[in-house]
Amino acid sequence: MKKVKTGVIGTGHLGNYHTKILSGLREAELIGIFDIDSARMEKIANDYGTHAFANIEKLLERCDAVIIASSTATHREIAERAFDAGCHVLVEKPIAENTSDGRKMVEAAENAGRTLMVGHVEHFNPAFEVAEPYLKDLLFVEGHRLTIYRGRGADVSVLHDLLIHDLELLLAVIGEEVISMEASGSTILTDKPDIANVRLKFAGGCVANLTASRISLTNMRKMRFFMKGAYVGVDFGGEVSIATLLGRGPAPPEGADRMEMPGGETILRWNIPVPERNALQSELEHFLMCVRTGERPRVSGGHGLKALELADVILEKIG
């Protein structure tokens, strides 16, 4: 198998992680990294046995593909330079600082005939992957994505930092237009909303109530999906649970817990085994496969753009 010559641009928290994983992937040849912070770049290059490039163009001309993990405001400029150099691109979420830049990135990728994938890593979370086949004909969705304040991501709102994960997953699973919304949020520790709640109604009738906070005292990443006679709970930390009325919803396995209800109904409950798998590694492996084969990414540039567009509308609603 021919290795994909790959570089990383931006060596902050996520760029460091990308570099570490790429250095051990058999599908990739890690050509090198670039960052405007030369001291940090040199340290990470030494840590993972790769080359620190002082010039971004020199890195691009030697690569087949690059990971863009720089600040959101730089995504469009760097992506366009990468496409001009003939590189495929995986850009960290959100795809861009605004929808105008995002659209231009999608157009640039199409014009260059190159793959553009957006790093919505929760799409590759093994808990979501095992739950996704069960998420049909949804009626109601509830989501909580809460983190302790960490300082990272403060260059964008909590909608673009955290909530956008759940927006992307909803758009992928439901595949319908949002026809109405109610939203509220507050600015607490930064100059952008740090906590937000939104209630979305989709064209087919499904309603989603989502909360995101980056100023919580605890961490939580959970979504609950409700359909006729069944419920699927996804804890992105590694647990998927299902509950159904007897004779409704997914077929239960042998040994599922039974709860006899006063009205005569029986509820069956069970957990789905979630494999231990690194979501970021799965994301990178998928990107490299798309580069080699030309397959459309599961989180394409166009799909990532839709998630950004929805986050922007919600932010405008909050005011």
Image (cartoon, rainbow, N blue to C red):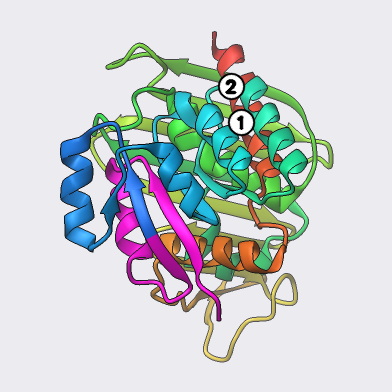
Q: Magenta segment range?
A: 1-30
Q: Which residue is mark 1?
A: 308
Q: Compared with residue 309, is residue 7 higher up or lower down, i.e. above or below?
A: below
Task: Locate residue 209 relative to residue 222 in the image: left or right.
Answer: right
- Crowding at dot 2, Cα within 10 Å, few <14 / some 14-19 / many 20+, comes out as some
Q: Compared with residue 191, is residue 238 higher up or lower down, i.e. above or below?
A: below
Residue 280 among those drawn in magenta: no
Point 65% across, 54% down: residue: 226
Residue kind at label 2, given as amino acid type: Asn
Does residue 157 appear anywhere in the picture? yes
Q: Compared with residue 223, is residue 292 higher up or lower down, i.e. above or below?
A: below
Rendering coords of residue 290 (x, y %): 64, 63
Q: Which residue is mark 2?
A: 98
Task: Tell me which numbered mark, 1 or 2, is placed earlier along the sequence.
Answer: 2
Point 66% across, 27% down: residue: 309
Residue kind at label 1, given as amino acid type: Leu
Q: Nearer the viewer, residue 272 or 263?
A: 272
Location of the N terminus by quadrant is bottom right
The secondary structure type at the circle numbered 1 is helix
Asked if labels 2 and 1 touch by Cβ distance under 8 angstroms, the answer is: yes
Rendering coords of residue 54 (x, y %): 30, 38
Q: Nearer the viewer, residue 207 or 92?
A: 92
Point 42% across, 23% down: residue: 156
